[in-house]
Image: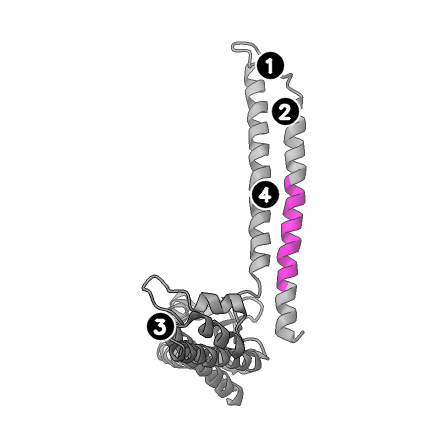
């Protein structure tokens, strides 16, 4: 487990711990509401006009509020459990130090699929009209028999094999991932930048994979608005306004620096 993966696991553990804590709170609150409700005899109505009417109404309202609090706490527990399930499922992050290796493996897998789909279409055309030979040829090419049967089954338009749009989309994914690899490789080769400006420091941290603006104190609202407009967000853990380091962030940082240097209040 590399450093990024360890951080992801720690984040997941925090969400799970929060969910567990809220679940325990919800259970305690629910039990308290039920105990309160048990103090009222079953079927006992509010005695209208009796001296106990207001006290009884208030007590029943507290029971209702306590049940509502228990349900709200359980909803929050479910929310954090869902967030824990989502950690690490968003694909390969550029922050992962092993991202290039993982993306390269992804490209290789996609290219293998591309070659296999092309080969399947060639075999289907070669044995056109003979379903048995088509299945046998696909099995020899590496498909399981049930997969081969699905490949030669006509789609909604009556086409068999892999449609051209499937090959096109797969190729587009390959090009997109290759472009990400080039960007990440370029980032790794960049020298860390450290520029002092008018009331700020601008840093390009290749280890953190972040472009950052650091201020000695809280910047004025005008400066914060400029940062937000250009995609920079406050990071309490870093004590800086940050964006993921890429070409777009570098270009945006130049605009932010120009605005900040032109007007101290900007």
Q: Are marks 4 and 3 in contact (CB under 8 Å)?
A: no
Q: Nearer the viewer, residue 256 or 35?
A: 35
Image point (56%, 29%), residue name: 64
Q: x%, y% of residue 212? A: 49, 76
Q: Which residue is mark 1?
A: 44
Q: Is residue 200 left or right of residue 23?
A: left
Q: Are marks 1 and 2 in contact (CB under 8 Å)?
A: no
Relative height, residue 239 to residue 108 (above, below): above
Image point (58%, 68%), residue name: 237
Find the distance from the CA under tag 4 to the CA under tag 3.
47 Å
Q: x%, y% of residue 150? A: 46, 65
Q: Which residue is mark 3?
A: 165
Residue 253 tag number: none
Q: Earlier in the sequence, mark 1 or mark 2?
A: 2
Q: Is residue 265 magenta?
A: no
Q: Earlier in the sequence, mark 1 or mark 4?
A: 1
| Region rendered in magenta | 11-26
Q: Earlier in the sequence, mark 2 or mark 3?
A: 2
Q: Which residue is mark 4?
A: 73
Q: Are marks 3 and 1 in contact (CB under 8 Å)?
A: no
Find the distance from the CA under tag 2 to the CA under tag 3.
63 Å
Residue 37 tag number: 2
Dot 3: element = helix
């Amino acid at each position: 487990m590399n450093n990024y993966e360890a951080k992801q696991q720690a984040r997941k553990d925090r969400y799970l711990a929060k969910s567990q804590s809220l679940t325990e709170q919800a259970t305690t609150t629910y039990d308290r509401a039920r105990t309160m409700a048990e103090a009222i005899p079953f079927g006992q109505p509010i005695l209208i006009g009796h001296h106990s009417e207001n006290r009884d109404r208030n007590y029943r309202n507290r029971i209702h509020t306590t049940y509502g609090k228990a349900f709200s706490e359980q909803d929050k527990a479910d929310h954090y459990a869902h967030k824990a399930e989502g950690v690490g499922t968003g694909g390969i992050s550029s922050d992962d130090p092993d991202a290039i290796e993982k993306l390269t493996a992804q490209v290789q897998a996609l290219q293998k699929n591309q070659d296999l789909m092309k080969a399947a279409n060639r075999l289907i055309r070669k044995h056109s009209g003979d379903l048995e030979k088509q299945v046998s040829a696909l099995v020899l090419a590496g498909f399981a028999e049930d997969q081969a049967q699905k490949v030669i089954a006509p789609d909604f338009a009556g086409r068999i094999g892999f449609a051209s749009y499937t090959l096109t989309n797969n190729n587009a994914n390959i090009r997109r991932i290759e472009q990400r690899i080039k960007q990440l490789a370029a980032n790794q080769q960049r020298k860390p930048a450290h520029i002092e400006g008018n009331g700020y420091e601008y840093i390009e941290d290749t280890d953190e994979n972040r472009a950052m603006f650091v201020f000695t104190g809280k910047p004025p609202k005008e400066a914060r608005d400029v940062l937000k407009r250009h995609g920079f967000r406050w990071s309490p853990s870093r004590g800086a306004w940050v964006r993921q380091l890429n070409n777009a962030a570098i270009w945006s940082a130049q605009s932010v620096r120009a605005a900040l240097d032109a007007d101290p209040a900007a």
